Amino acid sequence: MQTDFKSTISQSAVQRHENLAQSVGTALGETVRITSWRDGVDFWADLAYRNNEIIGVVRSPKHEILSTSYEGDVDFADIIEKEVEVLGLLQSASIPAPMIVSWRRRSLDSPISWMLCELIPHSPLEELAPSLQAELGDLARRIHAIRPIVSTMPIPVHWGSEMLGRLEGRLRSAKRYCDDLPTKRVLEVAKLRFEERQCAAVSLLHMDLRASNICVLGGRIAAIIDVANAMVGDPWLELGRLRSFGSLTEPFRKAYGLDDDTLLAAGAHLDLYELETATLLMSVAVEEIEAPALFEASRKRALELSSRLVA
């Protein structure tokens, strides 16, 4: 039985490589070979070769369209197109990011969406040294200074109501696994607080600035990758997510320009934004990656934040 399973996985990878090689080769006008490299929750990252020379990393979605309880239907062709625009914005702002070689949405001729970008050699990290935390804080500040005007990420016209709907969806999904969440009372607080941040919701947000998405070479950050979650919004939303990752460290805050008084004043805003991440991770841990430890940690944090917000 185990052998059959491995055989199925192997055949699936071979078929994916063949499909990608054909589509990428057609786009580049040359013969391309694809081999497996790494993968994440939603995407494969394969290596593309011209003869025996690596020409880049091919990023392709594991599902072209995925139905979730917390996001609805997600079309990954749209995600790929957004990533291309965001990487271009980062490069224009002199923020280290991979260069795009080519990309395609799925079509009748090619059923796979993909993006080919330059390979940034690096080993995945689980955490960043203090010097790198400071460097990331500076880069995050510069990312948030970008005011994008692109088709894939419209500037929110009604940030308060849009964010309220986003949080409500996260809470509704998470409540299936934790009935103790005081959803109604939290949303009453959120309705007022999100409206207060309307004018600030114009920044580019990466929304996944974890160590695993930071390429480090020679003790410096060589590139920021995986911009699939990027959006336009309030920088405090990203900072709340960073706090949930344990990344809002003193070196990061100092380089970003956050002092203790500013953090204290953020109060409920930061808690609400972190709650959005905690409830999201609860659902992801059950529905996508089967991670009991992540679920339990996120559940405890969601209850802690909720209690503080409605106290």
Image: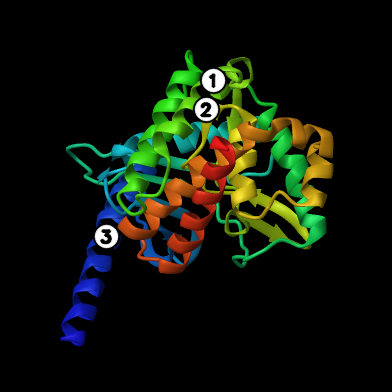
Q: Is 7 on the left-hand or right-hand side of 287?
A: left
Residue at horizontal 70 percent and vertical 39 percent from the top: 140
Dot 3 falls on a residue whose secondary structure is helix
Label 1, label 3: how far apart the Cα atoms are: 48 Å
Label 2, label 3: how far apart the Cα atoms are: 47 Å
Q: Is 195 on the left-hand or right-hand side of 217?
A: left
Tell me the tag on residue 192: 1
Kindly identify the amino acid type of the residue bearing the numbered disc 3.
Arg
Q: Earlier in the sequence, mark 2 or mark 3?
A: 3
Q: Nearer the viewer, residue 192 or 69?
A: 192
Q: Position of residue 152 (x, y in %)?
A: 43, 26
Question: Which numbered disc, 1 or 3, marks the residue closer to the eye?
Answer: 1
Q: Earlier in the sequence, mark 1 or mark 3?
A: 3
Quadrant into which the C terminus falls: top right
Label 2, label 1: how far apart the Cα atoms are: 6 Å
Q: Which residue is mark 2?
A: 189
Dot 1 falls on a residue whose secondary structure is helix
Q: Is 131 on the left-hand or right-hand side of 111?
A: right
Q: Quadrant of residue 185?
A: top left
Q: Quadrant of residue 69?
A: top left
Residue at horizontal 82 percent and vertical 57 percent from the top: 131
Kindly identify the amino acid type of the residue bearing the numbered disc 1.
Leu
Tell me the tag on residue 16: 3
Q: Are marks 2 and 1 in contact (CB under 8 Å)?
A: yes
Residue 42 can be seen in this image: no
Kindly identify the amino acid type of the residue bearing the numbered disc 2.
Val
